[in-house]
Amino acid sequence: MSKIHVSTSVNGEPVEFLCDASASMLDALRGPLGLTGTKEGCGTGDCGACSITVDGRLVCACLMLAVESEGHEIATIEGMAQGETLHPLQRKFLEMAALQCGICTPGVLISARALLEKNPDPTEEEVRFGLAGNLCRCTGYDKIVRAVLETAAEMRETVR
Amino acid sequence: MTDIRYLAPSTLDEAVRAFAAASGAARILAGGTDLLVQMRAGIAKPGTIIDIKKIPELTAIEDLGGGAYRIGAAVSGAVLAEHPTFGKAWPGVLEAVNLIGSKQVQGRASPGGNLCNGSPAGDSVPAMVAAGAVVTIQGPNGRRELPVEKVPAGPGRTNLAPGEIVVAFTLPQRPKGSGDAYLRMIPRTEMDIAVVGMGVNLTMEGGVVKAARVGLGAVAPTVLLVEDAAKALIGTKLDDTALEAAAAACRAACKPINDKRGTIAYRIKVAGVLLKRTAAIAARRAGGN
């Protein structure tokens, strides 16, 4: 069966690609679009390694068909830094060593950004619930949670 | 899996025609958080996928006035949470919908999918049952309505006829002094499947329960409407005797299974405990504080 042509927007850029009807958004990102920052962990929506946003809402790229992205706005980890300037979350994660192997990190960062956009002043508990869909097998989460809280505080200062 | 056909009709009539024409080889795609996992595991092998999210009626949230709402079956939990007034009228329904999976899953998963997946442990279903939601269904023979508790038929099965699609949930008007709540028991603190799910919806007047509905999940082949528990609450001030009678009615309604999340005895006990806790939250909300 012939491939389906999809027009969408990724990180603010209009893109087009061809895919099978059964291909996931994750397949399309990592395949034809060449954006391998979004990781595949479980493929069943449990681990959050493939977290992206669609029209600003957090989703697992593995739980969405690539064809469903037609006409929507996709944001991935590749769009998080502005050129050489890291997003405050990325910078803080490095400063505070909130990662070890790094596989979960793109997904964690996308989720953390989505959380802070909705709630710029989260409690520790809110951060833990906000990131409950992102599994990390290295850090024990503590450094991640602290880095998100620190970033939130810093971003609130900057806004003032 | 390259032979799958993907359709995204923009009208319900087209969707129903395509679904009926596929005679069982098609699956409806709303959020896809169950369907894509089932496809990946080889449990679902649809020849056609019919995406219903391009149909305006399926993704709309309508404020019908007086606390009544109509929620499209494919509205995601995240979109429902962003609605300016829905969560004030129906906090219990909203908290139940927003307990389905992680934030990522809530970005896609819908109450229609949660219902049609047919899991006895679906979180939104007991809250919808307690709310008295009516489900609009459209199929090859036209449109019909069913109380939400009549839709599930057993684990993974529904009473929908071939070719029928769930269109929307209609939640009734809220009399003054109404409140609802949903609680679930899970072994973890987040991201797990309910051992017991409890929805309670109360209308209070002068501290006395005027109307009550109780929805109970994860303790029987389908989510249950526990009318005896509601009867035990109506006309009371939610004193200990009334709450214990309602808890006993919930325990009596349980026909649970043993599994890794909880034993039969544990689930039955928890059903009673959750009734009391959930009713207390619903009553507080009904009182407006």
Image (cartoon, rainbow, N blue to C red):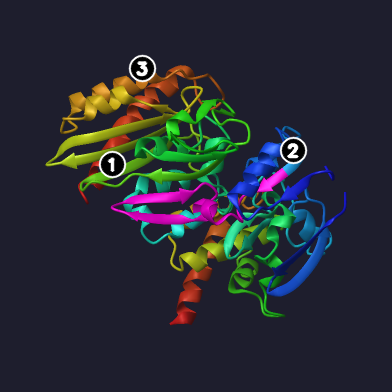
Host chain of mark 1: B
Residue at disc 3, secondary structure: helix
Which label's residue is closer to the chain start, 1 or 2?
2
Residue at 56 percent of width and 54 percent of height:
B107
Write the start and end of the magenta stretch as one range: B49-77
- Residue B16, visible in the rendered structure: yes
Reply above or below: B107 against B126: below
User: Of residues B144 and A51, which is closer to you in this image?
Assistant: B144
Question: Alpha-carbon neighbours of circle 2 within 10 Å: few (<14), some, or many (≥20)?
Answer: many
Q: Residue at x 25, y 45 (%)?
A: B178
Instruction: Choose between A54 and A121: the one closer to the eye.
Output: A54
A115 horizontally vs B200: left or right:
right
Give the position of the N terminus of chain B as an image quadrant: top right
Amino acid type of the residue tagged 1 in the rendering: Ala
Q: Quadrant of residue A13?
A: bottom right
Give the residue type that dot 2 points to.
Answer: Pro
Judging by the rendered image, the residue that carries numbered circle 1 is B282
Q: Considering depth in this image, is B13 or A129 the residue closer to the camera? A: B13
Q: Which residue is mark 3?
A: B252
